[in-house]
Image: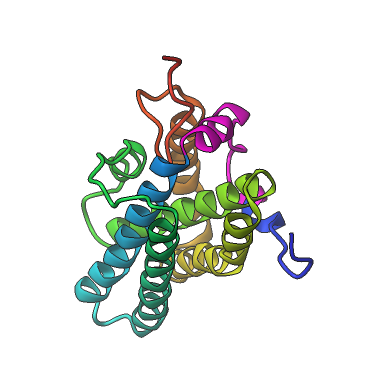
Amino acid sequence: MPQDIDLTPVHAFLPCRTPQAWIEAALADQRTMLIDHANCEKKAAATALSLMHRYTDNFQLLNKMSRLAREELRHFEQVLKIMAKRGVSYDPIGASRYAASLREEVRKREPGKLVDTLLVGALIEARSCERFAALAPYLDPDLSAFYTSLLKSESRHFADYLTLAKSIAPTDEVAARLAVLKTREQALVQGVDGEFRFHSGPPAAA
């Protein structure tokens, strides 16, 4: 783990660590892990672009999301390159319940909708960062180095989303909404899932 990357804020922000059972499932099915990782990077870029289209009056948001979208698309390209090198075809797979379930908690009216959307983004980016770090020690040197290289940008993405939320809503509102979202996130991460995905809980035993 590079010494200049401090994951303490990420670990402090998340409600729990990734279960070891999920790590073992990821190591046993690295093909699905890579395909869904590519999907996650593509969706992260799409989310950033969507926010840019919806909130054109927020210059801070526009700048941060523009940079984030570029970085996520670059990561997407890097995952595709790794997949091609390993003979992993980009087959369609269904999404996990993780992101959609978190978004069920998002309020319908503004500005609460934007605040909650940004906090969901912070949780997703923080969880991605935490999982890259959790997986890296167990992976082959090339994939371990790649996942370790993502930690700095993913931790910054988490911080950017959180900073944007805090710039819009009072501290007590952010804390209250995070409490709700973290409860849902912890249940999703620790609860047994029907199938393995990058943001799933541990898959049910076959």
Image coordinates of residue 10 in percent, x first then y, are 62, 54
Horizontal relation, residue 39 to residue 23: left or right: left
- Front residue of 164/21: it is 21
**Any magenta on residue 128?**
no
Quadrant position of residue 156: bottom right
**Vertical order, 66 against 21 (above or below):** below
Which residue is found at the position 32% from the left and 41% from the top? Answer: 105
Quadrant position of residue 19: top right
**Vertical order, 68 against 130 (above or below):** below
Horizontal relation, residue 140 to residue 99: left or right: right
Residue 198 shows in the view: no
- Front residue of 113/15: it is 15
Image coordinates of residue 117 in percent, x first then y, are 34, 56
Horizontal relation, residue 140 to residue 109: left or right: right
Which residue is found at the position 66% from the left and 49% from the top? Answer: 12
Q: Give the range drawn in magenta.
A: 11-29
- Front residue of 14/27: it is 27
Quadrant position of residue 147: bottom right
Image coordinates of residue 45 in percent, x first then y, are 32, 67
- State the scheme by which the image is colored: rainbow
**Vertical order, 197 against 205 (above or below):** below
- Quadrant including the C terminus: top left
Which residue is found at the position 41% from the left and 73% from the top? Answer: 74
Residue 184 shows in the view: yes
**Any magenta on residue 17?**
yes
- The residue most toward the top is 206
Q: Give the dominant element type of the magenta stretch: helix, strand or loop.
A: helix
Which residue is found at the position 44% from the left and 24% from the top? Answer: 203
- Quadrant including the N terminus: bottom right
Horizontal relation, residue 110 to residue 176: left or right: left
> How many labels, in total?
0
